[in-house]
Amino acid sequence: MPLHWLVLIVLTLGAVGYIVGRRRAMKSAGGDARFLHSLPAYYGTNVLLVTVVPAILLLIVWLLVQPLVINNQVTGTIPDESIPEGGSLGLVMSDVRRVAEGLDTAIDAGAMSREEAASIRTEVTDVRQRLAEVGVALGSNVRPEVLRAAQQYRSLDATGDLAMTVALLVLALAGFGYGVLRTTKDFRARNVVEKGILALLIGAASIAILTTIGIVLSLIFNTVEFFGLYPAWDFFLGTTWAPSFSGRGGASELGVLPLLWGTLYISIIALLVAVPIGLFAAVYLSEYASPAVRSVAKPLIEILAGIPTIVYGLFALLTVGPLLVDVFGAGGIFGLGWMKGGTAVMTAGLVMGIMLIPFVSSLSDDIINAVPQAMRDGSLGLGATQSETVRQVILPAALPGIVGAVLLAASRAIGETMIVVLGAGAAARLSLNPFEAMTTVTAKIVSQLTGDADFASPEALVAFALGMTLFVITLGLNVLALYIVRKYREQYE
Amino acid sequence: MFDTERAKRDVGMNDIKVAARNVQVYYGDNHAIKDVDVDIEDKTVTAFIGPSGCGKSTFLRCLNRMNDTIDVARIEGEIRLDGEDIYDAKVDPVQLRAKVGMVFQKPNPFPKSIYDNVAYGPRIHGLAKTKADLDVIVEKSLRRGAIWDEVKDRLSEPGTGLSGGQQQRLCIARAVATEPEVLLMDEPCSALDPIATSQVEDLIDELRTNYSVVIVTHSMQQAARVSQKTAFFHLGNLVEFGETGQIFTNPQDPRTESYISGRIG
């Protein structure tokens, strides 16, 4: 039975359970809802939940586990000698799955009957030819053991699907029966539904946390694998970034220092632009602007935050870069010849700074507004001017929060990719000249993974080590920011 | 019923420090203060009493133009400090507030050290030439605030770490450090316990020797205890203004009588 029918049946059963549960509760109270422990809807919801939730959970677990089990069983039937030289079991298994899918497609298209798909033999028929007719292209002729594995794969899959359908329906019906039987007027349906909602909320929180853990683990495993192929010492302390593109192994130099330097240099320039402008804008908006100006200006500044970073990248490449070349390039206004091309640290830094302005200003604005009015009154009441009040009372009081905002902006700057790819160039180098092209960790992760390098080579795996480095740096900054914000937050209480 | 001992002690005439004539205050469309005329004498404690929302705090904030910071507030009429109209275009509200200090309902020390809290005003107005001068001003102000003995050994600790009563006395010390001529106090004891209240009241009585003090209070006992003159506000009107002893023992207006005997308010 197709999956969506199964889900629909379970949901319908749940809906019926809602109505039945509600009716039964009302009946047990003699038709008067005042004699019930809970409102009638709670009894219905209780039956709905015990019918649907366990069934859906079983479905999810089954869908995750079944492919693993089948894979294991089929793998066992493939003889070792059928694995080609230099290949791996995984490659053979992906062939198997591809053939199995091809047979499914052929049956759906009506080009093959079920029995034929189960009994077809390469010795008799050209399977590759038959599958190509229905639009499934295979890389090579189908070998007999692969075809047999694929057929076994299909039959196990069918058995599994059938078992799943039965188990699911039985569970849903059992839940339905249990829920309905428990429904009497003294049953505390309200409390049970409350617990169900609690479980739902915990589940949502756990998914977020588990995903984070999964991402971190995948980073760690791949990083460890990378350090097995390439010495960690050379990675962390190497001053040259020169991956070889010739394929596997060889003379790649994968030193992270030029990339880290590029990242830091661009981020520092971005913060030098964003922090003063953002902070002054926040002070204006929260302390000086009238409500009318504020209601217009604040959303306008925050529009900047809504612009996709790729658009900022285009702005850097097409507008800011050429403009800077006109000023600082050879034959420019000052005739300095510092800048050779439009892509440079300065270009990316300036544009990234603009991108961060709303980030800094809106966080700082919130923090400045959180400084109690009593502080302003106290200072103004002593005869201080508005700017003296801001400088000597409000900013010191808001400082921890502002530092937190700046650190969060720094994490964003360090993690930014598109502006760097388009604005800063792709040359990894250690230089102090801000008008030279450089590149960052993020931009290099993109270029290492989008090439056609073998995924098991150090040239590709280095991306995970770079990602891990970046992750540790931004995590550290975020933790520091949260620590500072928390430590000083309750100062006015 | 009311202890008006301090009021009896001094009913002599002093110079008029602040003279308000025909003052109207509007918050948007709301007419908050109507036709208020009042003369506040030098070296005297004047108490403003009245039920909540009667406009006494609003009127107090007119005296140092703190209402300027509220966008919708509009003030008409005339308020003269030593004969000079404080709402004149020539007057700088910042300078005015240095002359007319203010202490707020809730203690509001800055998140700085005790020393820096007191030194804040003198630094802004350039009252001290040297660090030694500043030290002298800070000590003098803290002594006037009756808190010197409690904090002299921890001047570098944050002012927010003091107890509520100490914080309020610190705020009073901070206000007197700029050498104001008039000190406005907006319910200075409403956030304090009885012991701290009594300390602050004693302090107010001492401050009278140097300043003209105006205090807004909800406690009629407090008004009777600390003030020489009392003004009773009701619904934005100044109902009665006179010597404290007379207001509390022989009020002329029936509304005043109802209020102090607890029938309205």
Image: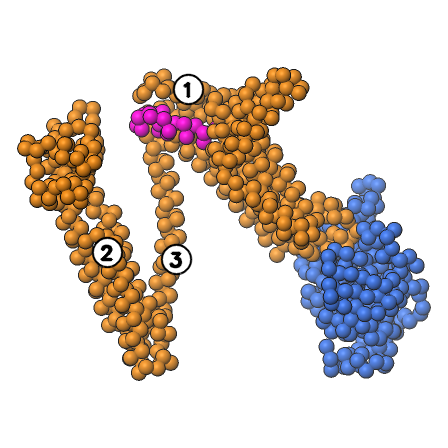
Chain colours: A orange, B blue
- Can residue A434 be seen here? The reply is no
Mark 2: amino acid: Trp
**N-term-proximal mark, 3 vs 1:** 3
Identify the residue at image location x=60%, y=26%: A323
Disc ID at residue A5 = 2
CB within 8 Å, label 2 to label 3:
no
Q: Is residue B250 left or right of residue B51?
A: right
Q: Which residues are magenta?
A: A440-461
Q: How dense is the environment of label 2, judged by Cα within 10 Å: few (below 14), some, or many (20 and up)?
A: few
Say which mark, if any, is on residue A242. Answer: 1
| Camera-nearest label, 1 or 2 | 2
Q: Chain of mark 2?
A: A
Circle 3 SS class: helix
Write down the quadrant of residue A301 in the picture: top right
Q: Of helix, strand and loop, which mostly describes the magenta segment?
A: helix
Q: Camera-side residue: A383 or A55?
A: A55
Q: Is residue B222 above or below residue A154?
A: below
Q: Is residue A197 above or below residue A412?
A: below
Q: Is residue A224 left or right of residue B216?
A: left
Count of numbered labels shown in the rendering: 3
Q: Residues under labels 3 and 1: Cα distance?
A: 48 Å
Mark 2 and mark 3: Cα distance apart in space: 27 Å
Rendered residue at 80%/79% (across/down): B256
Residue at (86, 70) in percent of width and height = B229
Counting residues from the start of the chain, the first of labels 1 and 2 encountered is 2
Q: Quadrant of residue A21?
A: bottom left
- Could you tell me residue A271's position as x and y percent? 58, 35
To which residue does mark 3 refer? A201
